[in-house]
Image (cartoon, rainbow, N blue to C red):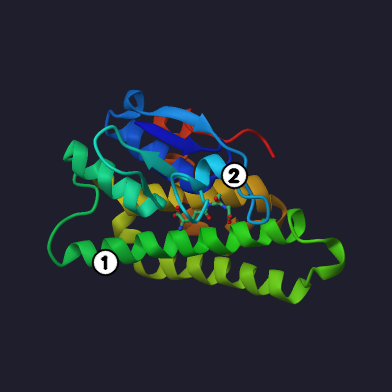
């Protein structure tokens, strides 16, 4: 299978961590893509009409995309059980969605400075996105600490990738001051071999 990827995308990293943790990393051939919302890659768009990373071209079916779909596909393929079953899975999937929402806000902040022309930038909008990051993190600390220990799950992977991205792109804002319990958790989770193997290049 071909994974359309960028080494610094946190959404791609979720997929790669799942692949490493479930023994499927060698099944993915990585195709590096450079894309932005205003200069979309045509090669990527041929796989995903939204031209967003990641996308997975499968050997035996059409391409699938959105990190959440690809992670669930890999989980199912390996029978890894990262989502739980029954009513418990909805709690897990809400945690996963919260981590992705944190990432959406953090990525939009980066686009504001890297993609939008300087004379069109709006600081109030950037700060509002950071507000979502912080309240998302606090929400996780209040509600999901119990999900962050024990058997590996998709919530832990999503959170690890989100925190890694905050360090990469928004280090000076020091997310740790807001959520000390998540900071302590990340000390251990961030050292997992799957996280080490998928570390993005320094900003
Ligand atoms: N919900 C999507 C978000 C993917 C996403 O925003 N990817 C970024 C890279 S980190 C992208 O491809 N951006 C290009 C664009 O916005 O056009 C997912 O989970 O896969």
Q: Residue furthest right?
A: 119
Residue 37's mark?
A: none
Residue at horizontal 33%, vertical 52%? 69
- Ranked by sequence position, the earlier of labels 1 and 2 is 2
Query: Pointer 1: what residue?
Result: 91
Distance Cα–Cα, label 1 vs label 2: 35 Å
The image shows residue 60 at horizontal and vertical percentages of 24, 35
- Circle 2 — which element? loop
Residue at horizontal 73%, vertical 56%? 115
The image shows residue 16 at horizontal and vertical percentages of 41, 36
Residue at horizontal 30%, vertical 62%? 93
For this view, does 110 lie left or right of residue 31?
A: right
Quadrant in the picture for the N terminus: top left
The image shows residue 85 at horizontal and vertical percentages of 14, 58
Residue 41's mark?
A: 2
- Circle 1 — which element? helix
Indicate if the residue with disc 1 has its beta carbon within 8 Å of ligand 1.
no
Viewer-side residue, 84 vs 108 = 108
Count residues near mark 1 (Cα–Cα under 10 Å), then give few for <14, some for 14-19, many for 20+.
some
Indicate if the residue with disc 2 has its beta carbon within 8 Å of ligand 1.
no
For this view, does 163 lie left or right of residue 72?
A: right
- Mark nearest the camera among 1 and 2 is 2
Residue 179 seen: no
């Amino acid at each position: 299978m071909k994974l359309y990827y960028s080494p610094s995308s946190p959404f791609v990293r979720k997929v790669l961590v799942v692949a490493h943790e479930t023994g499927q990393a060698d099944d993915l051939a990585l195709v590096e893509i450079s894309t932005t919302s205003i200069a979309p890659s045509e090669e990527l768009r041929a796989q995903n009409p939204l031209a967003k990373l990641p996308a997975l071209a499968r050997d035996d079916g059409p391409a699938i995309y959105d990190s959440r779909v690809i992670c669930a596909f890999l989980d199912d393929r390996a029978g890894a059980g990262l989502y739980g079953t029954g009513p418990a899975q909805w709690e897990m999937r809400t945690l996963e969605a919260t981590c992705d929402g944190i990432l959406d806000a953090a990525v939009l902040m980066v686009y504001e400075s890297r993609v939008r022309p300087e004379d069109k930038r709006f600081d109030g909008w950037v700060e509002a996105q950071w507000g979502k990051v912080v309240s998302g993190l606090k929400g996780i600390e209040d509600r999901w600490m119990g999900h962050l220990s024990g058997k590996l799950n998709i919530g832990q992977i999503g959170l690890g990738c989100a925190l890694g991205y905050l360090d990469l792109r928004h280090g000076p804002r020091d997310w740790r001051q807001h959520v000390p319990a998540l900071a302590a958790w990340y000390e251990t989770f961030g050292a997992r071999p799957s996280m080490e193997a998928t570390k993005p290049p320094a900003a």
